[in-house]
Image (spheres, rainbow, N blue to C red):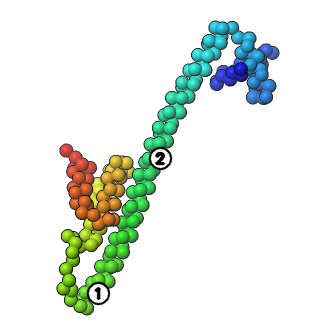
Amino acid sequence: VCVSAPRVRVPSPRGRLCGPSPSAASCRVTRVKRLSVSELNELLEEIETAIKEYSEELVQQLALRDELEFEKEVKNSFISVLIEVQNKQKEHKETAKKKKKLKNGSSQNGKNERSHMPGTYLTTVIPYEKKNGPPSVEDLQILTKILRAMKEDSEKVPSLLTDYILKVLCPT
């Protein structure tokens, strides 16, 4: 059995440290075979401590990585939806200009079946209060939800906007 201890340099039988050469493993095995039971137990404790420390560090680093990946996804989602809404607003504006030109040339007697005019919520302005840093992940999630509703011209926009104002801009 070949035992390799992290951060532990085992002296070779000649008194020098074993290096990373192919014979280093056999050097360590030979040295470990010569250790007493108490020395083996001490080495085992050192290895177990190192494993525990490395495991804790790994868990912390993985959690941080997951957190950063989630933050990146939220930010990318926000940017994508914002661009989509801006493009849709631009299209809506151009369409409205064309309709206005056509409307000026003829009168319109037909009625719209929808409860609101198309594009009503697309032109919504979201109030934003600039803070010391960038918006939090939670704020971006709320803003993304509002933007998605705006993009779909959903009737949920007023309630989402009200919730945002009450919870984020004017918390009690």
Spatial separation of the CA atoms under disc 1 and disc 2:
48 Å
Q: Position of residue 42 (x, y in %)?
A: 61, 13
Residue at which label 2 appears: 69
Please name the amino acid that badge 2 sits on: Glu
Q: Are marks 1 and 2 in contact (CB under 8 Å)?
A: no
Residue at which label 1 appears: 101
Residue drawn at point x = 54 percent, y = 26 percent? 53
Residue drawn at point x = 77 percent, y = 22 percent? 26
Which image quarter holds the N terminus? top right
Which image quarter holds the C terminus? top left
Q: Position of residue 32 (x, y in %)?
A: 71, 15
Label 2 sits on a secondary structure element that is helix
* Above or below: residue 89 compared with residue 51: below
Residue drawn at point x = 70 percent, y = 11 percent? 35
Q: Nearer the viewer, residue 19 or 1?
A: 1
Please name the amino acid that badge 1 sits on: Lys
Left of 164 or right of it: where is 39?
right
Q: Nearer the viewer, residue 57 or 134?
A: 57
Residue drawn at point x = 71 percent, y = 22 percent? 2
Q: Earlier in the sequence, mark 1 or mark 2?
A: 2
Left of 57 or right of it: where is 139?
left
**Within the image, what quadrant is residue 47 found in?**
top right
Badge 2: how crowded within 10 Å, few (<14), some, or many (20+)?
few
